[in-house]
Amino acid sequence: MQSTLTEELTLTLSKAACLILFELLNQSYERWREANPNDDSANPMVIEAIEHSQRVSLWKLEGSLERTIPELFSSDYEQLLSEARLLLTKQPV
């Protein structure tokens, strides 16, 4: 099943939602980077969606993912999730 996990998908989101999401992810990463300058810490990166627009953008992203990825409803979803974690752990950023 791993071969399908490398398939590229196209998501549809408004430009406004994308701008908000980019800024939210960028700010979250910058806060995490300050707390983890050596990048070897197990500390989680927390995304704080404080503004309503940030939460709406995250909900829109979640909805777009849900509409695009049929595997979310697969009986072997947990196995696919494990395979996806392994696959992404091995990929360079």
Image (cartoon, rainbow, N blue to C red):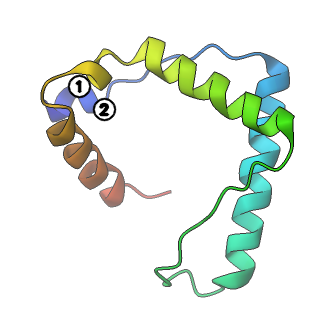
What crowding class fits label 1: few (fewer than 14 Cα within 10 Å), some (14-19), or many (20 or more)?
Answer: few
Figure quadrant of residue 89: bottom left
Quadrant of the drawing holding the N terminus: top left
Q: Which residue is mark 2?
A: 6
Side of 39 where 8 appears, left or right: left
Q: Which residue is mark 1?
A: 4
Percent x, y of residue 91: 37, 54
Percent x, y of residue 84: 28, 44
Percent x, y of residue 15: 81, 20
Q: Judge by depth and name the residue closer to the eye, 75 or 65.
A: 75
Q: Judge by depth and name the residue closer to the eye, 12 or 72.
A: 72
| Residue type at numbered disc 1 | Thr
Residue drawn at x 37%, y 19% is: 69
Q: Secondary structure at mark 2?
A: loop
Gap between marks 2 and 1, in whole Å?
A: 5 Å
Figure quadrant of residue 38: bottom right
